[in-house]
Image (spheres, rainbow, N blue to C red):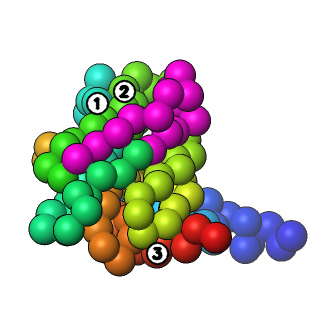
Amino acid sequence: MNPKTLVTNLLILLLVQTSNLSVVVNSLEAYHQQYYHRSEFRVPPNSVVRIVISNDLFGLKNNGNAGFVCTNGNGVWRKSKPGDRYVVAQFKYDGKRRQASTHCHLRSRFGFVNFPVNINPDTSAYCYPSYVCGYSVRKDGVYYKPEMKLYPWTRQK
């Protein structure tokens, strides 16, 4: 490298450092900091996020009973009637684990649904400020409220 160019670069670097400007050169660090350090992605330590399933099958002739089981539990089927709410998963942010996931299977007279349950900082941002996210059992399927995602029923044969 040319000695004159090297001295010029050092002088520019010294000038930038003394003027208290933070410059990130040839890096995406500034973009990532701006995106990931927004307030909705920060989860306070020891926050507990809960995923809840609520049975919203009201007004059906043969009752709106449903049953479900999830992989994180003891494998026991839980029966629910319209209006019941169950905590499917809960996760405490302790700074060591960043995410948790489980898989649930739900049955009713409409058929069955298999759906994943994932908890991560993005989930917590959707559920802020109560940190309670909900799945709703409806006539058209299982609806995940924060992401507005529908898992439709699969007919039983």
Q: Is residue 77 covered in magenta?
A: yes
Crowd rating for badge 1 (residues with CA inside 10 Å; few <14, some 14–19, many 20+): some
In screen coordinates, is 43 left or right of 2? left
Q: x%, y% of residue 106?
A: 47, 52
Whether tag 1 and tag 3 are in contact, CB under 8 A, the answer is no
Magenta span:
68-81
Residue wearing tag 1: 48
Residue wearing tag 2: 92
Q: Which mark is residue 152?
A: 3
Lower position in the chain sequence, tag 2 or tag 3 = 2
Image quadrant occupied by the C terminus: bottom right
CA separation, marks 1 and 2?
Answer: 4 Å
Image quadrant occupied by the N terminus: bottom right
- Give the residue displayed 14% in from the left and 43% down from the top: 130
Q: Nearer the viewer, mark 2 or mark 3?
A: 3
Q: Does dot 1 land on a helix, a strand or a loop?
A: strand
